[in-house]
Image (tube, grey):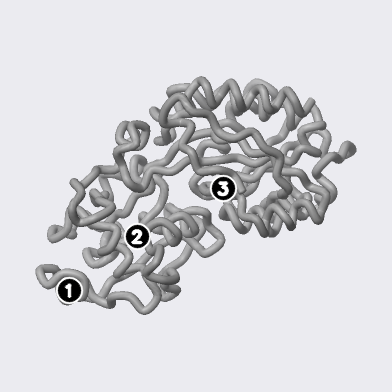
Amino acid sequence: MADKKFGWLGGSTSRRGFLATTGAAGALALAGCSETNGGDGDNAGEVIITGSSTVFPVSDEMAQRFMDENPDINVTVDSTGSGGGFENHFCPGDSDINGASRPIKDEEESSCLDNDVTPVEFQVAGDALTMAVSPDNDWVDCMSFDEMAQIWEEDGAETWADVNDDWPDEEFELFGPDTTSGTFDWFTENVVGEAGNHRDDYEPTEDDNLIVQGLQDNPHAIGYFGYAYYQENQDAIKALEVKASEDDDCGEPSLEAAQAGEYPMARPLFIYASEESVQREPVYNFLEFYLEGSSESFIADEIGYVPANEDVRDENLSTLEDLA
C-alpha cells in the first residue's frame, strides 16, 4: 500500500514504489481499444487516462495543454472514479494512467499484478475535501466529524433535528460520490470511520457537477466533493467549516489551510501510471509534461488544488526517468 504522508504539505516526499495496477478508459476511448499498456500500433500516438473525478480537472487541463504543444498525440481523459478506473480499465490494461484521490488498495494492486500491469505512484496535488449545503441553509456553518458521521453512516440520521435539536425537523437530501469513488473511500474511512459503513440511501454520482446542482436550490440538501468543484461554484453553494472533534476550532476549506496541514479533511491526490505504458514515447512524454507542471501555480489559480512542492515534483521526475 502507498503511504499516506502529505508530501505536498512540506518538505517530505512521497514514497517511490512500484505497484501492480491498471486503469479504465472511457466508453469512447475503449471502443476498439485493446492491449493499450505496452502496445504500439494504432494507439502509438494516444494516451488514455481514467479514474478519479477529483483528479479529473488536473488531468484534463494537463491533457489540453500537452495537446496544444503536441497536436499529433491524442490524450483522452475520462472520469470513472478511482476504484472504477482501477477495476474496469487500468488493471485490465485498457488505460495508461489512472487518477486516484486515495492510495491504491491491496486488492487493486493484486488485480493489476495478475494482469501483468505494474502501477507506479505519483503524488501530484493536494485537496481540501469539502462538505457543502445550499446557500439557503442558515442554521449550520460548521460540523464536527461526529455530526457528519451521524448523517452519512449506515442507518444514520433522517432529519437535521436528529443531529442537533436546534436544526430544522426536515429530512436530508443527500448527494455524494459513487461507491467507486476515491472520495467516497476517503470520507468513509476517515470521517464515518468507526461509526460503520457509509449509508447507501443517497444520490450517488461520478459527476461532481451533479452534486453541486443538487445542492443549489434545496435548503435541506448536503453533499461532499473535491475543493475544486466548490471553488468553481462558490457563488451557488455554501461550504461548511469542519472540525475533527467538538473541542477543536472550526476550519474553513481552503488551499492555504490544506497546504499548512490545518484543515482536517486535507488529502493527497495521485496518478498511477502503468510501467508498461511508460515505455511508449507518447505516454512518457505526457507524464514528464504532467509532472513538471504539477508544481505550477495554475494548479491552485485555475483548478483549485494545492500544487505539488518542488521536492515531490523532482522525486516524481526521477522516478519516471528510472523507468525509461
What mark, if any, has residue 305 been given in the picture? none
Mark 1, Cα crowd under 10 Å, few <14 / some 14-19 / many 20+, is some
Between the residue at mark 1 and the residue at mark 2, the CA separation in whole angstroms equals 17 Å
Drawn side of residue 276 relative to residue 194, left or right: right
Mark before the other along the chain sequence, 1 or 2: 1
Query: How many numbered tags mark residues here?
Result: 3
Between the residue at mark 3 and the residue at mark 2, the CA separation in whole angstroms equals 23 Å
**Residue at x-position 51% and y-position 47%:** 101
What mark, if any, has residue 161 been given in the picture? 1
Give the x, y percent position of residue 150.
29, 69
Between the residue at mark 3 and the residue at mark 1, the CA separation in whole angstroms equals 36 Å
Pointer 3 residue: 103
Mark 3, Cα crowd under 10 Å, few <14 / some 14-19 / many 20+, is many
Residue type pointed to by label 3: Pro
**Residue at x-position 49% and y-position 34%:** 125
Give the x, y percent position of residue 170.
20, 75
Drawn side of residue 124 relative to residue 17, left or right: left
Q: Nearer the viewer, mark 3 or mark 2?
A: 3
**Residue at x-position 65% and y-position 21%:** 69
Dot 3 and dot 1 residues touching (CB under 8 Å)? no
Nearer-the-camera pick, 114 or 237: 114
